[in-house]
Amino acid sequence: MREITYAEAIREAMSQEMRRDEQVFLMGEDIGLYGGAFGVSLGMIEEFGEERIRETPISEAAIVGASVGAASTGMRPIAEIMFSDFTAVAFDQIVNQAAKMRYQFGGQAKVPMVIRTPAGSGTGAAAQHSQSPEAWFCHVPGLKVVVPSTPYDAKGLLITAIRDDNPVLFFEQKLLYRKKGPVPEGEYTLSLGKADIKRKGKDMTIVTYGRMVDLCLNVAGTLAEKGTDIEVIDLMTLLPLDQETIIASVKKTGKVLIVHEAVQTGGVGGEIAAVIADSEAFFYLDAPIKRLGGLDIPIPYCIELERCSVPTEETITQAVNQLIP
Amino acid sequence: MMAEFLGKESGYCQGKGGCMHIAGLDVGNLGANGIVGGGIPIAVGAALSTRMKRLDRVILCFLGDAATNQGTFHESLNLASIWKLPIIFFCVNNQYGMSMSVQRHVNIEDLSIRARSYGMKGERIDGNNILEVYETTQKAKKYAMSKGPILIVAETYRIMGHSKSDATRYRSREEVEQWKKKCPIKHLRNHLLKNKVLTAEDLDALDAKAAEDIEAATRFAQNSPYPPVETIMEHVYA
């Protein structure tokens, strides 16, 4: 199969959906000739024009609010928020408007919209351009939260997200934009709320998502040579959470490490740990449930401090070794 | 609406929205908003749909004087203006944002001048003159559909409190009495009588009919059941 990058996979998903459905359009800052801050929409304005590749002023609340209004009146907007940190500027429109409209109107409204936004550290952009804020939104019924880890997943999940009738937050991983992988040329969908076991194993489970998936797979590959067989679950969707896959895996392996780049306190790792502890998997545990998140700090600027603020292959290996000495 | 106020199953939102969130999407009402200024960008999005679907339609977005101090107001007016969307921003200046008077919450006398900084037309009218409100809105509709957005600021007054907890300690009885004299309903009644459009008997009959309708709506609401608890998880997702 041909290989394309994560960014190209996202662009292809948007372009194919826009060709298929006239109601789909993209709205955001600098998404036209500039191609978006990370070049994801490069070239799309040439094909679809200014009406459907709709550039906005720097007004995040208005971008999301206008998307809610357009979505609830029959369009399918994709809103690009340039950095996921900036979702905070549009927070009310996401959590009080998009998420609640259907429920508070007794099912009258549908809000089919996607908020695409790049997340994560590793670009030397410091505290306001490097966060992984997905957990903020996992606390809000009415939203769906997706974090793809491969080009293949990114395309399939984005097509599904665009066709979904609910507001979906789609956290793109900055450091993965140039990652290449096999991606079918045609349209395909991947279910939201379904995790993917990226590596089968029997000795322990690592539950992770996003950029951390590759790191965990590398660690699992290295440790396999030493005789430790690790199962790696890529959640792909954080809300709704695929509890079944997590529980089944932990029942099988008896040991679990949860890894995410987002700061540990209040991160989705706590919820995953609670899901396991609340379930029958608890009785199969041979060791405490272990979490490894980012340090509880804003992302620092200095490249070495930044590197040490989130899990690395070294710290993941150390965490695994605590469970399997 | 009355059923929704009482949280009943027969209400517009099946008892899940209440007085702050009444919507009727089937008749083009995109809903009220519990967040001051929260609905303004949503209205801009509805106007954007109208434009992109090439519909012959205009969006009417109501907001209060206090909402003009929210960032969403400014972002939305700017966005609507650069895209020349068919939308009327109708600001009901009832002189108070909860307890804070408009004199204290802005440093301008005429809120409609805020439109100017977005290259948009702004008009200030007597909100207690029903005919002026009607005619201005009709003209604004034509304007919005052909030229783009417009801001109307209708000066009026909130006779009652902000909510049931409001003891109105922040204003004088005299002030309220002064405004009561400018009652828009009485004003319209006198206008209709003076111009011999309707007789006093006609108007009394209309008043009686309105009271009767409200009474019937209240009875309907009171006699409606609460939604079954089994519906509690419905409508979170489509």
Image (cartoon, coloured by chain):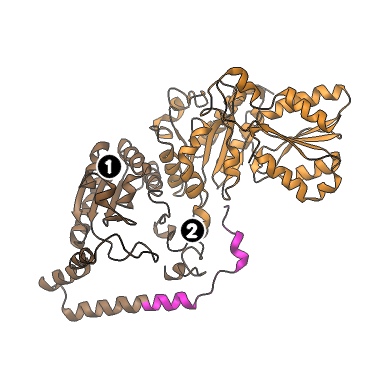
Chain colours: A orange, B brown
Instruction: Residue B39 in the image: state x and y as whole percent.
Output: 40, 50
Q: Is residue A120 above or below residue A134?
A: above
How far apart, in angstroms, are the residues tagged by discs 2 and 1? Answer: 29 Å
Total labels: the figure holds 2
**At numbered mark 2, what does the secondary structure look like: helix, strand or loop?**
loop
Front in this rendered view, residue A6 or A234: A234
Give percent across and percent down for residue B167: 34, 65
Q: Which residues are magenta?
A: B215-238
Quarter of the picture containing the C terminus of chain A is: top right
Does residue B56 appear anywhere in the picture? no
Residue highlighted by disc 2: A105
Type of the residue with mark 2: Phe
Q: Is residue B28 above or below residue A205?
A: below
Parent chain of label 2: A
Q: Nearer the viewer, residue A164 or A268?
A: A268
- The image's mark for residue B18 is none
Eye-nearest disc, 2 or 1: 2
Q: Check the image and report above or below for A260 versus B191.
A: above
Q: Which residue is mark 1?
A: B148
Marks 2/1 same chain:
no
